Image: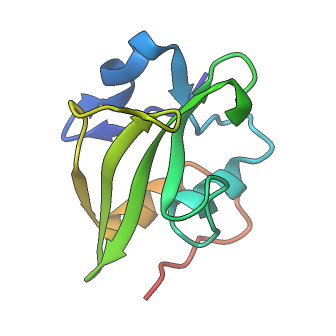
Amino acid sequence: MFIDFLIDGRSLYELVKRHGFIPVLEPEDKNLELRISELTLVRLSPLGGNRYPIFVCAQCGDLDCGYISAIIEESNNMICWRDFKKGEDMKLNHIGPFYFKQRDYNNELNRATPTASRPIAPLL
């Protein structure tokens, strides 16, 4: 079971499921809060730079098995997901860019962690 990303009512998972990956957010994942802190730009990306994994291996979630990532940036209280890639080289030009109001974006991601000890503060 995973938490899909719905953008304008459309499933992002449906756009990439043919690649065999699932969204990085899973309710039972012991690292869920860590993954959310990455997506909200509180924690640095494990991939380096501004590139963050959005989808991971459906079997183990390990980045070594492959992933789909995007550059995530914040500017003027907006979050942008752009430049989607499968692995390090294969551009997925049919996805994005997507823009979100930072406050709404952080609120939605924080809702994914009902047991979180504290909400994730937005970057200012």
Q: Residue at x 69, y 56 (%)?
A: 33
Outermost residue, right side = 30
Name the side, left or right, on which 121 lies relative to 27. left
Residue 108 lies in what quarter of the image? bottom left
Outermost residue, bottom side = 124
Q: Residue at x 72, y 31 (%)?
A: 64
Q: Is residue 122 above or below residue 107?
A: below
Residue 65 lies in what quarter of the image? top right
- Between 93 and 56, the one lying in front of the other is 93
Q: Is residue 76 above or below residue 7?
A: below
Quadrant of the image for the N terminus?
A: top right
- Between 23 and 88, the one lying in front of the other is 88
Q: Is residue 66 above or below residue 7?
A: above
Name the side, left or right, on which 61 lies relative to 87. right
- Between 45 and 112, the one lying in front of the other is 45
| Residue 19: % across, % down | 45, 15
The total of numbered circles placed on residues is 0
Q: Is residue 12 above or below residue 42?
A: above
| Residue 56: % across, % down | 60, 30
| Residue 12: % across, % down | 33, 31
Q: Residue at x 54, y 65 (%)?
A: 49
Residue 114 seen from this side: no
| Residue 35: % across, % down | 64, 52
Quadrant of the image for the C terminus?
A: bottom left
Residue 85 seen from this side: yes
Name the side, left or right, on which 23 lies relative to 117. left
Q: Residue at x 33, y 65 (%)?
A: 104
